[in-house]
Amino acid sequence: MTVQEAAERTGHAVRATPCDDAGPPVLLDVREPDEWDAGHVPGAVHLSLTTLYEGTPLPCEIQGRRLIVICRSGNRSRQAADLLGAHGVEAVDVIGGMRDWAEAGLAVVDARGLRGTVA
């Protein structure tokens, strides 16, 4: 999935696509905490790939939702989508990750809610 498709489907684009009854998919950021703190998509949910591999369950508020998984470049998000899919979770990864997201001019905020950077 491209960053533009991810932005549209999760409501981060100027013109979001219609949602089904389950609500829009959730953008799940699987980078490490220091990367998240430096810059992430507003409204995204954070759960590192390391934590997923350790077997930590998904937060209650996103269980049963479709997930769009993002990382810095797309490698970890692809791994996470495969791992989640193996556990019956509908998940796709964002090609190009946060690098392409920021390059496309889409919003990135830091841990304080200010303009963030991709670490």
Image (tube, rainbow, N blue to C red):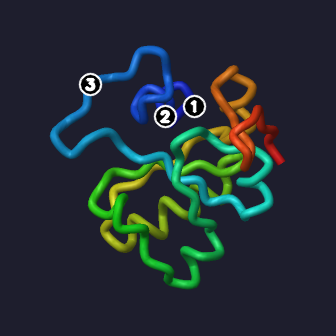
Q: Nearer the viewer, residue 96 or 67?
A: 67
Hey, which quadrant is residue 9 in on the image? top left
Hey, which quadrant is residue 11 in on the image? top left
Type of amino acid under label 1: Val
Residue 8 image point, x, y percent: 44, 26
The answer for how far apart the CA atoms under marks 2 and 1 are is 5 Å
Question: Badge 2 is on which residue?
Answer: 6
| Placement of 105 over or under 28, stated as above or below | above
Residue 70 image point, x, y percent: 59, 48
Residue 61 image point, x, y percent: 35, 60
Residue occupying the point 58% across, 58% down: 46
Residue occupying the point 57% across, 31% down: 3
Hey, which quadrant is residue 33 in on the image? bottom right
Q: Is residue 7 left or right of residue 117?
A: left
Question: Badge 1 is on which residue?
Answer: 3
Q: Which mark is residue 18?
A: 3
| Placement of 86 over or under 10, stated as above or below | below
Q: Secondary structure at mark 3?
A: loop
Q: Is residue 39 left or right of residue 78?
A: right
Residue 28 image point, x, y percent: 51, 53
Q: Nearer the viewer, mark 1 or mark 3?
A: 3
How crowded is the residue under tag 2: few (<14 C-alpha within 10 Å), some, or many (20+)? many
| Placement of 105 over or under 81, stated as above or below | above
